[in-house]
Image (spheres, coloured by chain):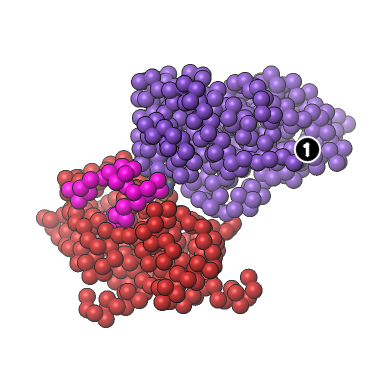
Amino acid sequence: MNLSERSALERKAREIRGLTIEEIGYLGVGHIGGAMSIVDLLVLLYHRHMRIDPANPAWSDRDRLVLSKGHAGPALYAVLADKGFFPIDWLLTLNRGGTSLPSHCDRTKTPGVDMTTGSLGQGLSTAAGLALARAMDGLPGFVYCIIGDGESNEGQIWEAAMFAAHRRLSNLIVFADWNGMQIDGYTREVIDMDDITAKWTSFGWHACMVDGHDFEAMDAAIQEARERATPGREKPSIIILKTIKGKGCSFCEGQVSNHNMTYGIEQTMQALQALGVSPRLIPELLAQGR
Amino acid sequence: MTTSREMRAVYAETLVRLVESGRDIVILEADLMKATGTGPFAQRFPSRAVNVGVAEANLVGVAAGLSAGGKIPFAATFACFASRRAYDQFFLAANYAQLNVKLVGTDPGVTAAFNGGTHMPFEDLALMRAIPRLTIAEPSDPVSLAALTALAADTYGCWYLRLQRKPAPVLYEEHEQFTIGRAKVLRTGSRVTLVALGALMVREALAAADMLALEGIPATVIDALWLSPLDEQTLLSHMQCGCVVTCENHRIVGGLGSAVAELIAEKAPGTRLARIGVAADRFGEVGTQDWLAEHFGLTAPHIAAAARALVNGSEQAQTEPAGTGTDSRYH
Ligand SMILES: Cc1ncc(C[n+]2csc(CCOP(=O)(O)OP(=O)(O)O)c2C)c(N)n1
Ligand SMILES: [Mg+2]
């Protein structure tokens, strides 16, 4: 990754953060913390790695993403809208009655969303199933999956871990958003997961830990994970991302109670200013007197 | 003016009081302590508060073990996960093993609101009603919540308490007595009986009764409180009017409407029934609670319309030959 590629990704990530803050801020409440912590990853995947076609969301050869921590849907919606999967003003319908953008990801409602999630722990099993189907059909490409650190408390995560390793699903690349927080506080105080890289390694996975806000480090880790698809070396991969919950959102970054926050237009505008991006959705609304 | 109280605050302070008066209660949470609002309990009795993390199967399993070890566990999580995610653990390790586990499902039905369809339990009561001997209750106000929580603590056996966390208006006098399996008749009227479960639906049923009264259709309103054991005696004694409307914040399959339909079929045939609740073929959706209640037809105007149709239908049935009554099912 050269310097200009990196700064383009950084710029895009700031824009996506801004859009996500506007999207939730217009509604007035939402899962801002866990959305912010995965923005850099989503931008890297959708702008550099994933084979997708916004004009044809159902393209059968596309790469898949299962956002297992489904409450971070609003960040994914911002990326998908920005990519052109659906009109950008849909973002203002988040969680309103009849919307196509519900708080948790829903494959039946949102173009570009590959799997329905929201009950934590289930997404990784479905990602393994998707990866297995592709392996059975000899299809190329990757299935990406994003889980949370709190989510990793669920037993089903570890059932899926054993399964994917046993089946050598090397087309499965998982990211664990290691932001150190869940709803009731710091993960180390709720359920201490200890040496998580060692845990996954012992489950038979290719596992590594990188800074989840460093594009180059993540990019290199993804390259290495993809190489696990070469015959003889097959293993599923997990990239544990050291992240900051609420990253890049001035009123929320690193706060203990930033899982689900109530905030309004004023704070939205302040956060956007701090990010150095202009609002894309809200001025139009204000102009319309809404 | 009626006062409202946040239901979760009542739940937490009742548990504190019960421990203070000597009950060996342990509360269990699955990374939703902030939602359940049991923080004050955990502060007061840190060693009696267990957070298992995001792990509902383990939540219920540990609760069963604590019960086998002599404790009185109150385990709480969103009702969708309490029912669907930990059903076998609750069925087997708690109920079949004849232990003493109190499972609390919060955010029932449309009260899940912005958490959306994935989190919207319209089937928890149906699942729970299929478990033998399980006591199932949905308190309707802060007073009944406190009383039923105390009854749960003092009555050996497994319970499922369906709990709206948000504020609810006070319906009962402070020292009202509650008995397991006994519903409360809130209002009597001669033409139709509205049977409602839970704070939201009792409120809507009372509002529907007001609307019906203005039209000259006096309605009885029953706060069911218990789905299991169902208060058959009270219900049957108010079926003489011949028209019953059940009101539940749940799919019409397997919950209150089904239980009353079974009761009518076996013990009061000929009674006309309409079930207000979420239609059998629908999943939950996202939106504000008010939007959802209207969207799924749970509000007072829907209840009143169903009652009106039943009453009119039964008048017709008296004047026309038998067998011409219209299908009374509302949805
Ligand atoms: C099975 C299940 N249990 C509980 C919840 C409620 N819940 C939503 S998010 C969350 C905490 C998740 O923590 P983490 O995975 O660390 O997410 P992040 O910090 O990335 O937001 C919980 C308990 C849920 N969605 N699913
Ligand atoms: Mg986390």
Quadrant for the N terminus of chain B, please. top right
Residue A217 relative to residue A69: left or right: left
Q: Which residues are magenta?
A: A174-198
Give residue A181's position: percent from left, percent from top. 35, 51
Residue A93 vs A237, above or below: the answer is below
Residue A283 left/right relative to B323: left
Residue for point 88% across, 31% down = B319
Q: Secondary structure at mark 1?
A: helix
Snapshot quadrant of residue A14: bottom left
Query: Could you tell me if residue B90 is visible in this image?
Result: no
Task: Look at the image and give the colour of chain B.
Answer: purple
Q: Is residue A191 magenta?
A: yes
x and y, in percent, of residue A227 in the image: 16, 62
Local packing at callout 1 (Cα closer than 10 Å; few below 14, some 14-19, many 20+) is many
Picture colour for chain A: red
Magenta span contains residue A253: no
Quadrant location of the C terminus of chain B in the rendered image: top right
Which kind of residue does numbered mark 1 sit on?
Answer: Ala
Q: Quadrant of residue B260?
A: top right
Q: Residue placed at 63% from the left, 70% from the top?
A: A290
Q: Which residue is identified by label 1?
A: B209
Residue drawn at (17%, 63%) of the image: A224
* Residue drawn at the location 54% of the way across and 39% of the way down: B8
Depth check: give the residue in front, B124 or B176. B176
Out of B326 and A125, give the one closest to the viewer: A125
Q: Residue furthest bottom?
A: A4
Most extreme residue toward the left is A232
Viewer-closest of B50 and A103: B50
